């Protein structure tokens, strides 16, 4: 296939990606939360399975169009159905954790296509083994699988658009805006939970902690963005809310209350993992690198100089990424000399994460998503 034919094929497949992603986004898994197992089996399961199959076939077509001799892999494709967890290299590539080993653009496209196809096949296999009667697990798996379809196709569209010097067909701006809102929501929740420490040695402390946590959860549940949270996160919040209310209405034994409080703290800490989302990794890295350039220019001339309003607004979009950033944003800190060590630390953290990935990854990564490296 010559270069012109290959680009035409890519364009055709990317238009199909847009149609498929639109169909995925049209499915609201949340509307099935109170559905019977019969409805889940007759409606949600076949819809999700069909979209996974179509996405797998479409990604395979892109891989064929790459015409690479042998796409790289960390495991044989035959091993995929035996895995209990998602295919690790998928997140490594799409979230920018890999290392560029092959400058050939076809190989870069093939890398994502190959691991995306493995991931989609694995998701279909996992879904086929779950019974709709296991409602919570089944809904969570469908929700996760549909998100993987969107993530895989958006990743593929973006790397093709970059390598072919053409605009992306799939607009991920809405995904970024949603991710930033969710991160701010999680950061506010986390700040409330840990506002007064996490000691749970006294009954009085546990009661205060759990009342505060119950209010914080109610605030999150009452926000319009709650429906956009991952199904697993919504379930966990509701479960913790029920446990807190149950303890407050009970005899309030210290050991039971302390156990609930520890689970609340653990969940609040886990919510930091939202920073691993592809759209947030790229956004944060671009903001940090832009801020570094601006700060370098300013602090070289005058250490008392303030950052510009534009830079401050960009740094404010990092809210929820780092506690120190949140502190500086909340107090409206404008001094460049105060911001400089914070931004340098964040840049170093990202660099160290990329270096760790380069030592362990054997998959040629995609620099489209290596903005954070």
Image (spheres, rainbow, N blue to C red):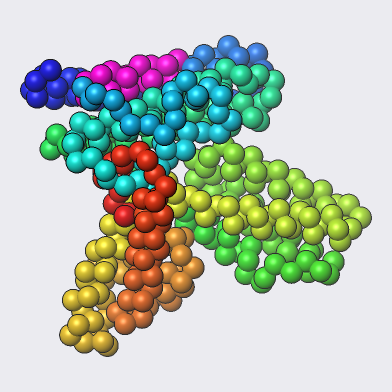
Viewer-proximal residue among 130 and 256: 130
227 relative to 289 in the view: left or right: right
Q: Quadrant of the C terminus?
A: bottom left
Q: Is residue 25 above or below residue 101?
A: above
Q: Is residue 162 above or below residue 353?
A: above
Residue 331 place in picture, x, y as percent: 43, 76
315 relative to 169 in the view: left or right: right
What secondary structure predominates along the stretch shown in magenta?
A: helix
Residue 207 inside the magenta-drawn segment = no
Tell me which segment is drawn in magenta.
Answer: 50-66
Q: Is residue 330 above or below residue 125?
A: below
Q: Residue furthest right?
A: 251
Viewer-proximal residue among 34 and 3: 3
For image coordinates 18% across by 36% down, the residue present is 104
For image coordinates 30% across by 28% down, the residue present is 71
Q: Quadrant of the N terminus?
A: top left
């Amino acid at each position: 296939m010559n270069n012109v034919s290959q680009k035409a094929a890519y364009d055709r497949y990317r238009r199909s990606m847009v149609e498929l992603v639109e169909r995925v986004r049209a499915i609201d898994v949340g509307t099935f939360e109170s559905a019977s197992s019969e409805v889940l089996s007759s409606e949600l399961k076949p819809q999700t399975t069909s979209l996974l199959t179509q996405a797998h076939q479409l990604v395979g077509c892109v891989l064929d169009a790459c015409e690479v001799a042998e796409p790289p892999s960390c495991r044989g494709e035959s091993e995929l159905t035996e895995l209990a967890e998602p295919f690790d290299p998928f997140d490594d590539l799409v979230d920018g954790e890999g290392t560029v080993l092959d400058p050939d653009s076809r190989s870069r496209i093939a890398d994502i296509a190959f691991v995306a196809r493995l991931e989609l096949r694995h998701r279909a296999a996992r879904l086929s083994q779950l019974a709709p009667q296991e409602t919570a697990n089944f809904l969570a798996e469908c929700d996760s699988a549909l998100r993987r379809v969107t993530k895989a196709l958006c990743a593929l569209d973006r790397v093709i658009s970059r390598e072919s010097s053409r605009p992306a067909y799939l607009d991920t701006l809405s995904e970024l805006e949603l991710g930033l809102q969710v991160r701010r929501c999680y950061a506010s929740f986390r700040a409330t939970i840990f506002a007064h420490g996490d000691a749970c040695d006294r009954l009085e402390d546990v009661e205060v902690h759990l009342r505060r946590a119950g209010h914080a959860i109610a605030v999150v549940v009452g926000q319009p963005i709650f429906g956009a949270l991952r199904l697993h996160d919504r379930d966990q919040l509701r479960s913790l809310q029920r446990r807190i209310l149950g303890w407050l209405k009970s005899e309030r034994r210290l050991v039971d209350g302390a156990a609930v409080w520890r689970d609340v703290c653990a969940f609040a800490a886990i919510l930091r993992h939202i920073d691993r989302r592809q759209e947030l990794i790229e956004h944060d890295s671009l903001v940090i690198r832009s801020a570094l350039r601006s700060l370098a220019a300013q602090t070289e001339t005058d250490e008392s100089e303030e950052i510009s309003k534009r830079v401050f607004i960009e740094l404010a979009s990092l809210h929820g990424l780092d506690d120190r950033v949140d502190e500086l944003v909340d107090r409206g800190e404008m001094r460049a000399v105060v911001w400089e060590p914070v931004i340098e630390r964040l840049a170093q953290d990202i660099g160290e994460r990329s270096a760790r990935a380069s030592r362990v990854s054997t998959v040629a990564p995609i620099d489209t998503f290596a903005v954070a490296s």
